[in-house]
Amino acid sequence: MTDTVTSASVADESTTQGLLGAALAVTAWGAASIIPKAMDMGGMAIAVYRFALYFAVLVGWMAYRKAPFSVTAIRRSVLGGIALGLDIALFFSAVKLTTVVNATIIGSLQPILVGVVGVRFFGEKIKAIDAVWSLVALAGVTAVVLSSSSTAESSVTGDLLAIGALFSWSAYFIASKQSKGSITPTEFTAGTAFWAFVINLPLAIAFGQDLGRPSNGDLVKVVILAVVAGVIGHSLMNWSLVRIPLWIGSTFTLLIPVASSLLAWAFLDESLSWGQGIGMAVVIGSLAAIVVGQHRRKIDQLEVAVP
């Protein structure tokens, strides 16, 4: 009996840590999304510097921890790295051709796609109430994005690129979940950073983006971007995905537009409408309901474990 209770308690603690890690990861991504707005570099050039820098930081950290990065990690992270690199390239290209509204809403469909994969291939079970709250959160994100829409024109090509980014971003999450047991989350994060750098470097050159040394101001922002989005965001999410269901980690990404909108309002003096505020409240409330539901189920499991 003691062993059963202890195992259930450990599982509950691991899930709680995973939920907290995912929440912090998407908050970091939301914060990082406003940094490129204040930079003079092209999107792919930013990606090249960002991935190269946080790859170097992670490799240095692993060497310090006496667990050096290996060729095996590069090989086992190749699918996730390609997916991440393509997501960055496709999304930045999409927002150049279509509206940010279209690109963001298309990207917000990721929890639905990933949820289907989680149920089909990872044996995850999504309660009906959780599915409802996820759809409510998706509606909230749509309200946030539409309330800040611009007059820019969309294009079919741009929308198709955004769809490509959607599938690539989803594939990255799936690859992260699949990496459990083969390499550590830190190895996976470092490996995907390497591959994302390899993919974006020739693309940046092909599209004529300036890869020369950034200005001192932009260099500081690249460092912040690498640390916040890479070391904190990607590392925490990959660490969390081995502790929580894939669909929950994916659903948490709906917080990214909320965090970025709030931070842009606070630090970039961007306007914030009542529609956005209501949408944000809906997203946060819906995700909170999912988290509370997960916690209650773990408590129920603990009670069942005790005769």
Image (cartoon, rainbow, N blue to C red):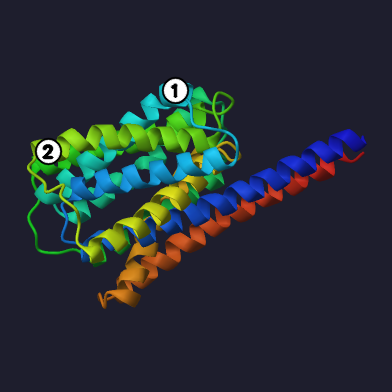
Q: Which mark is residue 277?
A: none
Quarter of the image that includes the C terminus: top right
Q: Which mark is residue 71?
A: 1
Image position of 282 with respect to 114: above or below: below
Q: Position of residue 133 (x, y in %)?
A: 49, 52
Q: Quadrant of residue 208?
A: top left
Q: Which mark is residue 205?
A: 2
Between residue 90 and residue 212, name the one nearer to us. 212
Q: Which residue is rendered at x = 60% and y = 46% of the image?
A: 18
Looking at the image, residue 60 sits to the left or right of residue 109; the answer is right
Secondary structure at badge 1 equals helix
**Dot 2 amino acid type:** Ile
Between residue 231 and residue 111, name the one nearer to us. 231
- Residue 115 seen by the camera: no
Q: Which residue is rendered at x = 30% and y = 61% of the image?
A: 221
- Residue 6 seen by the camera: yes
**Dot 1 amino acid type:** Val
Asked if the residue at tag 1 contacts the one at tag 2, i.e. Cβ–Cβ closer than 8 Å, the answer is: no
Q: Which residue is rendered at x = 35% and y = 57% of the image?
A: 223
Label 2 to label 1: alpha-carbon separation: 26 Å
Q: Position of residue 119 (x, y in %)?
A: 51, 29
First in residue order: circle 2 vs circle 1: 1
Looking at the image, residue 80 sits to the left or right of residue 91; the answer is right
Quarter of the image that includes the N terminus: top right
